């Protein structure tokens, strides 16, 4: 069974600090990787996508992918209280499968 | 707003009734995905459709659930003879190409009484 694992948290980070969120996946053939943010009672919002090994930066967000270690991470710099949410890691396993496999999410709290 | 649209946003059904959930993808997107989020659980993929075709229904329960995406109009997720365990948030997502980034709609919260 293809799995995506995340630490459920809560992860508490002071305002202005770097928040580091981690995710591991079981299917070595996975092709593409996504981070979504979900506020309580709302729908997932796409933050970042990453397809190849290395880092990808977009504003305050950096996604990191290491396929050999089957590991994806998301860094949030200069954390703001509005970043407090649940962050979902999602993996597209490829190979004809089209639905994303989601982790259960990490609950992030930014302390003012 | 050219985002993914879903309706209704909230739906209450009694056990045994039918629920119909509708999804209109973002403009220019022809790939639609349905997911379910049960309370305290993660998002689970249900079905992937393109216009007039079901491409992948590996996550759909075998009974009572069906989906369609007709040539004209929104995608429909249909749940027949609902049971309390069907109470969940149902999200639709769309993408411009297969395997591309998926953008989610606001969801339909189904409550079965």
Image (cartoon, coloured by chain):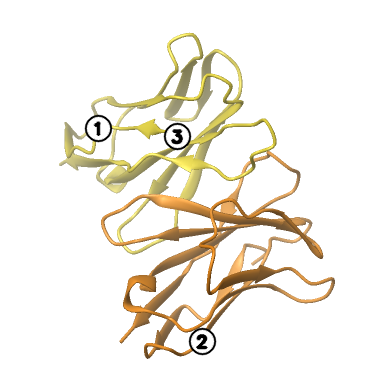
- Quadrant, the C terminus of chain A: top left
Q: Is residue B25 above or below residue A110?
A: below
Task: Estimate the spatial distance between the alpha carbons at disc 1 and disc 3, rounded to whole Å.
Answer: 19 Å
- The mark found on residue A1 in the picture is 3
- Tell me the SS state at disc 1: loop
Is A67 on the left or on the right of B10, as rendered? right
Residue at x 41%, y 77% (from the top left corner): B110
> Crowding near pointer 2: few (<14 within 10 Å), some, many (20+)?
some
Chain of the residue on which disc 2 is drawn: B
Q: Would residue B40 be found to the left or right of residue A52 on screen?
A: left
Residue that badge 2 annotates: B18
Look at chain A in the picture and name its colour: yellow
**Of callouts 1 and 3, the N-terminal one:** 3
Left or right relative to B41: residue B62: right
Q: Residue at x 31, y 46 (%)?
A: A86
Q: Are marks 1 and 3 on the same chain?
A: yes
User: Circle 3 sits in a helix, a strand or a loop, which is it?
Assistant: loop
Task: Indicate the position of residue B28 as horizontal and vertical percent values.
Answer: 79, 56
Mark number displayed over residue B65: none
Judge the density around disc 3: few (<14), some (14-19), many (≥20) Cα neighbours within 10 Å.
few
Q: Secondary structure at mark 2?
A: loop
- Give the residue drawn at x 53%, y 70%: B63
Q: Colour of chain B?
A: orange
Would residue A67 be found to the left or right of residue B83 on screen? right
Disc 2 to disc 1, C-alpha distance: 37 Å
Front residue (pair A16, A106): A106
**Looking at the image, is mark 2 or mark 1 nearer the viewer?**
2
Whether A106 is drawn above or below B16: the answer is: above
What residue does disc 1 label? A7
The picture places residue B32, in percent across and down from the top left corner, at: 67, 57
């Amino acid at each position: 069974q293809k799995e995506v694992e995340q630490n459920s948290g809560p992860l508490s980070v002071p305002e202005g600090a770097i928040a580091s969120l981690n995710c591991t996946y079981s299917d070595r053939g996975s092709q593409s990787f996504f981070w979504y943010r979900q506020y309580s009672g709302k729908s997932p919002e796409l933050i970042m996508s990453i397809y190849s090994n290395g880092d990808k930066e977009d504003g305050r967000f950096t996604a990191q992918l290491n396929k050999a270690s089957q590991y994806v991470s998301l860094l949030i710099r200069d954390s703001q209280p509005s970043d407090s949410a649940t962050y979902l890691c999602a993996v597209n396993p490829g190979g004809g499968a089209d639905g994303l496999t989601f982790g259960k999410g990490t609950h992030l709290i930014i302390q003012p | 707003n050219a985002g993914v649209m879903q309706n209704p946003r909230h739906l209450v059904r009694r056990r045994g009734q039918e629920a119909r959930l509708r999804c209109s993808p973002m403009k220019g997107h022809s790939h639609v995905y349905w997911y379910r989020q049960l309370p305290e659980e993660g998002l689970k993929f249900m079905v992937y459709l393109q216009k007039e075709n079901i491409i992948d229904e590996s996550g759909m329960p075998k009974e009572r659930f069906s989906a369609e995406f007709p040539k004209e109009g929104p995608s429909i997720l249909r749940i027949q003879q609902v049971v309390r365990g069907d109470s969940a948030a149902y999200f639709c997502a769309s993408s411009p190409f297969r395997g591309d980034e998926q953008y989610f709609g606001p969801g339909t919260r189904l409550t079965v009484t």
